[in-house]
Image (cartoon, rainbow, N blue to C red):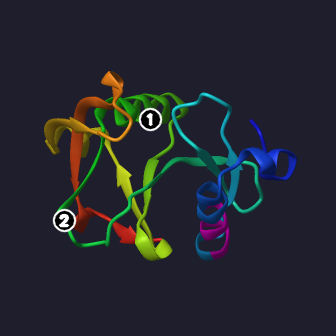
């Protein structure tokens, strides 16, 4: 796995911000996932030895609380859940909204089955792959990171 120290130039500003939040607020060390991996960050215990979670980071250009749900690609969530099951660690989704507030939810397969689905996606790039099944995650499930 790549580390932030070795590959800091490959990490986005958002990934660096979330990694620092987990370190400073939760006492965990964070590293950058492999390129083309379904998730962005892996979490290790304070000593940096035991893998304790994987994280996907998404930025949304909206005010937190404006909508009752956050929608995310169903395929993205399924891929991260499969990997978290294989690694036997929790999967966290972190959303960054306007104002750079960080909101986190732990997604479990049992919860994932209950979430509402809809067809939608980005319309600004005019790509067919951007129109897909989305999962609506209620904002009340999130907590501040």
Q: Nearer the viewer, residue 100 or 135?
A: 100
Residue placed under numbered mark 1 in the picture? 80
Q: Quadrant of residue 126?
A: top left
Residue drawn at point x = 39 percent, y = 35 percent: 125
Residue 132 horizontal/vertical position (percent): 25, 29
Mark 1 and mark 2 lie on one chain; the one further toward the N terminus is 2
Res 97 → quadrant? bottom left
Q: Secondary structure at mark 1?
A: helix
Principal secondary structure, stretch drawn in magenta: helix
Question: In the rendered view of the protein, which quadrant contains the N terminus?
Answer: top right
Q: Residue at x 59, y 70 (%)?
A: 26
Gap in angstroms between the C-alphas marked 1 and 2: 24 Å
Task: Tell which tag, 1 or 2, sits nearer the viewer.
Answer: 2
Q: Is residue 67 shown in magenta?
A: no
Q: Mark 2 falls on what kind of element?
A: loop
Bounds of the magenta segment: 19-24
Q: Is residue 111 above or below residue 138?
A: above
Q: How many marks?
A: 2
Magenta span contains residue 20: yes
| Residue 67 circle label | 2
Q: Position of residue 141 (x, y in %)?
A: 26, 63
């Amino acid at each position: 796995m790549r580390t932030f120290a070795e590959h800091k130039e490959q990490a986005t500003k958002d990934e660096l911000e979330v990694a620092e939040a987990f370190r400073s607020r939760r006492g965990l060390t964070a590293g950058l996932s492999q390129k083309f991996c379904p998730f962005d960050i892996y979490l290790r215990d304070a000593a940096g030895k035991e893998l304790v979670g994987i994280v996907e980071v998404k930025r949304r250009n909206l005010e937190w609380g404006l909508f009752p749900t956050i929608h995310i690609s169903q395929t993205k969530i399924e891929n991260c859940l499969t990997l978290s099951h294989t690694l036997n660690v929790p999967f966290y989704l972190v959303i960054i909204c306007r104002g750079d507030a960080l909101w986190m939810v732990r997604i479990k397969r049992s919860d994932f089955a209950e979430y509402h689905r809809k067809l939608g996606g980005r319309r600004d790039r005019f790509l067919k792959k951007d129109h897909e099944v989305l999962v609506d995650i209620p904002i009340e499930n999130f907590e501040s990171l």
